[in-house]
Image (spheres, helix red, strand yellow):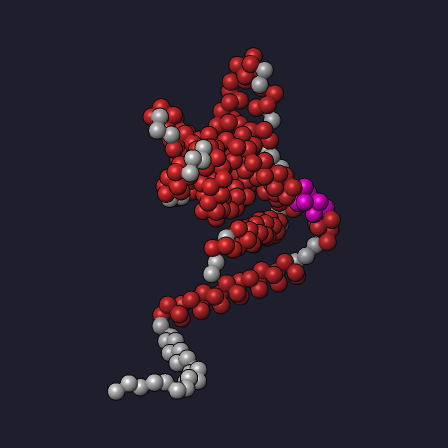
Amino acid sequence: MKFVATEILPDQAPPPRPPRQWNSARISGNILMLFWTAAGIGLIWFLFTSWDPEKFDKYGIKYWTGLQTTLTLVAVSIALGAIISLPIAFGRLSKNKIIGALSFSYVYIFRGTPLLVQVFLIYYGLGTFRAELDALGIWIFFRDAWNCAILAFTLNTAAYQAEILRGAIQSVPKGQWEGADSLGIPRWKTFQKIILPQALIVALRPYGNEIILMVKGSAIVALVTVFDLMGETRRAYSRTFDFQMYIWAAVFYFVIVEVLRNIWNGLELRLTRHLKR
């Protein structure tokens, strides 16, 4: 005997969510959230009550100049590092053992040593070879702390960007290459039009993280007499002995990072909209 449905049942409400239990993890999480909320409110209240218009008029423009120096340093280093990272990434992917070993050594050294040490070696270390560099006509470059900082940051970020790009390229399935070969598409055109766009989507988030790390790491150039945001902060503190100068510097760095994070989130959503269902 067969049964035939003659009407459609109305939509039923979803079952109620089970009540959340107050376990130790939830309690500790709420306590930490209350603590950080109170700390944030306290910090805002402290900055509001201790606001000094005279200091703002005197050092505000210096903070702005230092902020421009920081952003310029990071932007130039990231751009130059991206250019240098391309041959290094291709060297890491090369089947030639010599090229692969040289590329690996570069990445291994610059990723395995602190950025501060690299800055000191270039600024102070090469300064011990002034006579030799002067004879070669390049001392005029290395005597400037700004040039040394740009060089150190560029070489450092090039190593990280090369590894990001290498991993992104290797994440693209080999079937993409095989499909392009079957259609007779040249290898360079396959890489340019098919592989690279997919790899950059994968590398987008790591690239954003690298830029943020460079922004925060740029504070170390103040140790080699470059007056970036941290350099101007140190100079302001040495004249006022007011520790809120460092609090304002932290606020500026936090704002920069948040702006970059939101820009990168929007860019990622824009470029991966075709992957959303």
Nearest the viewer among 275 and 216 is 275
Nearest the viewer among 213 and 199 is 199
Dominant SS in magenta: helix
Q: Quadrant of residue 71?
A: top right
Question: How far across and down, in percent of the image, does residue 37 sit?
Answer: 53, 65
Compared across the picture, whether 213 is left or right of 63 comes to left
Question: How far across and down, in percent of the image, does residue 136 sit?
Answer: 55, 14
Question: How far across and down, in percent of the image, does residue 110 sit?
Answer: 43, 33
Residue at 53% across, 14% down: 132
Q: Write the start and end of the magenta stretch as one range.
A: 58-66
Outermost residue to the top:
135
Residue at 41% across, 80% down: 14
Question: How far across and down, in percent of the image, does residue 243 sit?
Answer: 59, 50
Q: Quadrant of residue 238?
A: top right
Compared across the picture, whether 11 is left or right of 96 comes to right
Residue 64 lies in the magenta-colored region: yes
42 relative to 167, above or below: below
Quadrant where the image shows the N terminus:
bottom left
92 relative to 206, above or below: above
